Image (cartoon, rainbow, N blue to C red):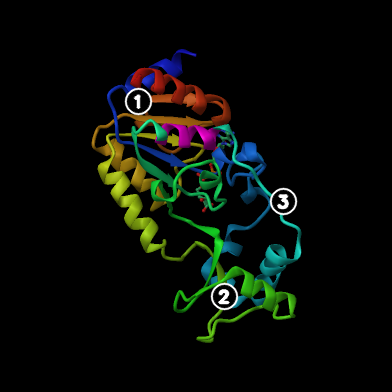
Amino acid sequence: MQQIAAAAAALEGRTRILVFTGAGISTESGIPDFRGPEGVWKTVDPKDFTLRHYVTNAEFRRRRWQRRFGEDRREYRPNAAHKAVADLWATGRMVGCITQNIDGLHLDGGLPPTALAEVHGNTRGIECVAGGHRHAVAAVRRRWLDGDLDPQCHCGSILKSTVVLFGEQLPMAAVNRASQFSGGADAAVAVGSTLSVFPAAEYLLAVADRRHPLIILNMGPTDADELATVRLEGKAGDLLPRLVDALRADTE
Ligand code: APR
């Protein structure tokens, strides 16, 4: 596909590429996106996922814990696109990856934790709303199995997953790492995101603002298409491995 060649040419000589990913990189692993044709927001109200709604709605919290601890959770596997990001990291031409996803599939796909900024948090941790006190997942799960269906922190405040809810501060460590990646990048590749949510998208757009090449790989339009040096229309699992192969050939 000549668009892949055009994208590789636009990235020629770039050695600090920022990869910015959204829900679209995980749909081929079986995880729905938010705004695509089968997106989550078509059937679920985003207002249910604000911090305020979580804190004020005990029934909603109990349902979330039931989903987390009570239902057998399907194991999702990284797909070819996640592996392609890890392969690109291995070429030494990436400054890092900023993901909006909470599924942990970049890590499962082989990307080292130091190369990843999860700006919307992840499902792997549990903390309290008031003081950010961390709790071991196994301990909270044991309490839940013993009947504590809306577990509280020792400080008295409500426990929640370390996924960022609307209206919540982004995690400091991830924000610092994302700023470092964005500030140090000399090119950017956006994969599977409508680029419609801030402040996350700002980390990507700041690279384009410095007039560095921006490749947008997506199924369907994004809010930043007019800034793209090259647009790759199609599935991340098909196109990203081919782009990384072209970049590797360029490096060898
Ligand atoms: N390959 C390429 N693109 C895909 C694929 C795929 N296999 N599957 C879906 N897409 C596209 C969709 O068409 C859509 O344009 O990926 C994009 C995903 O966009 P969103 O659903 O808006 O997801 P994202 O950009 O990650 O949303 C950002 O919004 O709701 C909040 O916190 C949530 O992190 C999320 C944030």
User: Alpha-carbon distance for marks 1 and 3?
Assistant: 38 Å
Res. 219 in view:
no
Percent x, y of residue 178:
35, 50
Percent x, y of residue 219:
55, 31
Horizontal arrangement in the rendering, residue 213 relative to residue 30 (left or right): left
Q: Amino acid at mark 1?
A: Thr
Q: Amino acid at mark 2?
A: Leu
User: Which residue is the site of mark 2?
Assistant: 159
Instruction: Specify whether residue 203 is painted magenta.
Output: no
Is the residue at mark 1 in contact range of ligand 1, meaning its CB lies under 8 Å from it? no
Looking at the rendered structure, the secondary structure element under dot 1 is loop
User: Alpha-carbon distance for marks 1 and 2?
Assistant: 44 Å
Badge nearest the viewer, 1 or 3? 3
Q: Which mark is residue 74?
A: 3
Q: Which mark is residue 229?
A: 1
| Residues in magenta, as a range | 81-89
